[in-house]
Image (cartoon, grey):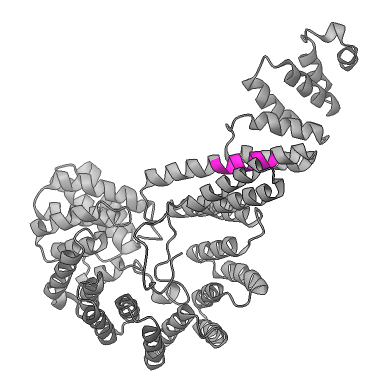
């Protein structure tokens, strides 16, 4: 997750999401070449940690929380470091609406390192999500007292004060933060935070300060536009459009600003003007579902129902996978209703009917004000700030959050192959040290993440056999024999595994056609 506060300088060249994984693997293999097996093992374990964390993030971004949790749990037992896996498990639990589980993970981490500011902020968020905002603030006050240099905890405490409707206390802390991090991005973050808690005048003042310090700073005018809409609703539509257009001149390809500009233009029934902005928003995965929704509305407003229905069908398909997260009931109702209208206008009443019914099931009013809709589409996606902001970065994303699905899938394939390779090599090293049980466990992990990894079934079966785990050896040895049916030594090992597992008929079946049985007394005896 990114930090709450912007850094004074940021690199323009972000490393790829799997950089740490590939670096650890390369270092492990370098240690092997230098004949330093202990160092190599440590690096391979680091690769496992990085790989499972990456795979967990990819599952999380794809909306597969159970798979993400399993990957983070594997990361937790892969290496000595527990901090990042526990933080990831806590964040995931919070996203799943399980603050008590999150608190358990965080207490476990804080028992090891009481001065972990990020863990404290997440624990405050867990308390807050459990309906205990006073306890959250108490936790953060302790952190700020113990770690006065931790600006992020100070910022989180200010957010907690805003939630408890203590804006003066928050203002004092935020002013201190701005003095210690005197860059325009700090004032943008302060303005956004004030906005999220309904302190609109303070939000305007903070955002204007950012512009004073750097007239072309990105996002300041965008947030000013959202402040106007939240504060004044439909009366501020034209002013918001102006703000979003000013932002577009600074950041013409910003998908979020483009989405809001397009959305407000559609609300103002300026459908043709909305199209270019919505097309820009389509290019980003994070804004694509909402952009499709409003593009469909615009096309419907332009009396192009066939195009609108195609676009809205895509929007519904994407949104259904995000319901409860990025999409709430109001948005789902609107999508189904707009699609039903588009289909009806094409004369396809039969296909329209189920979408009218779906809209009714969401049980919301069909007409929303511009203010309500803007609230739904703000960066918190309509959630109560108390559930998201206190103690957690407002930029709570992983390195893979904004990637397109096909890019994430390719990264996941690479991560699985790399995890299998690291586990396999650890198994080989354990085999060389004659630690066959440990070797088998490593090979089994490699097989579980990539069953088709070269020779993994064979190696697993041999390790189980050498460890005396004959019954457990039979399955991987059978799989290996299917891949290498002419391998006589493998066939005999499988037969002996069945024999030692007291499954005599399977052993006899394999030995019956063994060409060396007649000349090998041990095989004759086994048969």
Residue appearing at x 17%, y 56% in the figure? 297
- In the picture shown, does residue 77 fall above or below 517? below
Would residue 513 appear left or right of 294 to someone viewing this image?
A: right
| Residue 349 shown in magenta | no
* Along the viewing direction, whichever of 132 and 517 lies nearer the viewer: 517
* Along the viewing direction, whichever of 210 and 308 lies nearer the viewer: 210
* Along the viewing direction, whichever of 318 and 459 lies nearer the viewer: 459
* Along the viewing direction, whichever of 17 and 288 lies nearer the viewer: 17
Residue 202 position within the rendered picture, expressed as x and y whole percent measured from the top left: 28, 86
Q: Which residues are magenta?
A: 418-427
Residue appearing at x 17%, y 61% in the figure? 262
Would residue 504 appear left or right of 400 to someone viewing this image?
A: right
Chief secondary structure of the magenta span? helix
| Residue 422 shown in magenta | yes
Residue appearing at x 57%, y 68% in the figure? 102
Q: Quadrant of residue 395?
A: bottom left
């Amino acid at each position: 997750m990114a930090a709450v506060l912007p850094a004074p300088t940021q690199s323009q060249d972000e490393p790829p999401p799997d950089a740490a994984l590939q670096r650890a693997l390369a270092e492990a293999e370098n240690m092997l070449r230098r004949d330093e097996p202990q160092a190599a093992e440590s690096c391979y374990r680091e690769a496992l940690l990085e790989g499972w964390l990456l795979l967990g993030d990819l599952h999380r971004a794809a909306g597969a929380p159970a798979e993400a949790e399993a990957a983070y749990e594997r990361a937790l037992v892969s290496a000595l470091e527990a901090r990042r896996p526990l933080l990831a498990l806590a964040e995931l639990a919070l996203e799943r609406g399980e603050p008590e589980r999150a608190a358990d993970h965080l207490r476990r981490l804080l028992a090891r390192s009481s001065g972990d500011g990020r863990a404290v902020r997440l624990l405050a968020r867990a308390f807050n999500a459990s309906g205990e905002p006073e306890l959250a603030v108490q936790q953060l006050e302790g952190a700020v007292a113990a770690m006065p240099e931790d600006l992020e905890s100070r910022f989180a405490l200010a957010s907690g004060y805003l939630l408890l409707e203590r804006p003066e206390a928050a203002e004092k802390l935020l002013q201190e933060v701005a003095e210690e991090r005197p860059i325009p991005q700090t004032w943008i973050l302060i303005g956004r935070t004030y906005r999220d808690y309904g302190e609109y005048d303070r939000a305007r003042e903070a955002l204007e300060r950012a512009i004073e310090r750097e007239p072309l700073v990105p996002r300041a005018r965008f947030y000013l536009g959202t402040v106007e809409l939240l504060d004044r609703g439909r009366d501020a539509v034209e002013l918001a459009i102006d703000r979003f257009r000013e932002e577009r001149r600074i950041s013409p390809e910003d998908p979020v600003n483009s989405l809001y500009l397009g959305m407000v233009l559609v609300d103002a029934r300026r459908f043709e003007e909305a199209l270019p902005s919505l097309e820009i928003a389509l290019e980003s995965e994070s804004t694509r579902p909402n952009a499709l929704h409003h593009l469909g509305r615009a096309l419907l407003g332009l009396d192009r129902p066939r195009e609108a229905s195609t676009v809205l069908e895509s929007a519904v398909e994407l949104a259904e996978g995000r319901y409860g997260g990025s999409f709430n009931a109001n948005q789902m109702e609107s999508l189904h209703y707009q699609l039903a209208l588009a289909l009806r206008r094409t004369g396809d009443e039969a296909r329209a009917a189920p979408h009218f019914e779906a809209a009714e099931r969401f049980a919301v009013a069909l007409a929303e004000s511009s203010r309500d809709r803007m609230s739904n589409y703000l960066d918190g996606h309509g959630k109560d700030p108390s559930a998201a902001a206190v103690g957690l970065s407002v930029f709570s994303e992983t390195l893979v959050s904004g990637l397109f699905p096909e890019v994430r899938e390719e990264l996941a394939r690479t991560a699985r192959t790399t995890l299998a390779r690291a586990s396999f090599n650890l198994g080989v090293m354990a085999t060389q040290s004659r630690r066959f049980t440990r070797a088998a466990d490593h090979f089994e992990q490699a097989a579980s993440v990539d069953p088709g990894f070269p020779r993994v079934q064979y190696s697993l079966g041999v390790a189980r056999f050498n460890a005396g785990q004959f019954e457990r050896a039979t399955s991987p040895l059978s799989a290996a024999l299917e891949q290498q049916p002419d391998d006589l030594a493998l066939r005999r090992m499988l037969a002996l595994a069945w024999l030692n597992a007291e499954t005599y008929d399977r052993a006899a079946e394999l030995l019956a056609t063994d060409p060396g049985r007649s000349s090998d007394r041990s095989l004759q005896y086994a048969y």
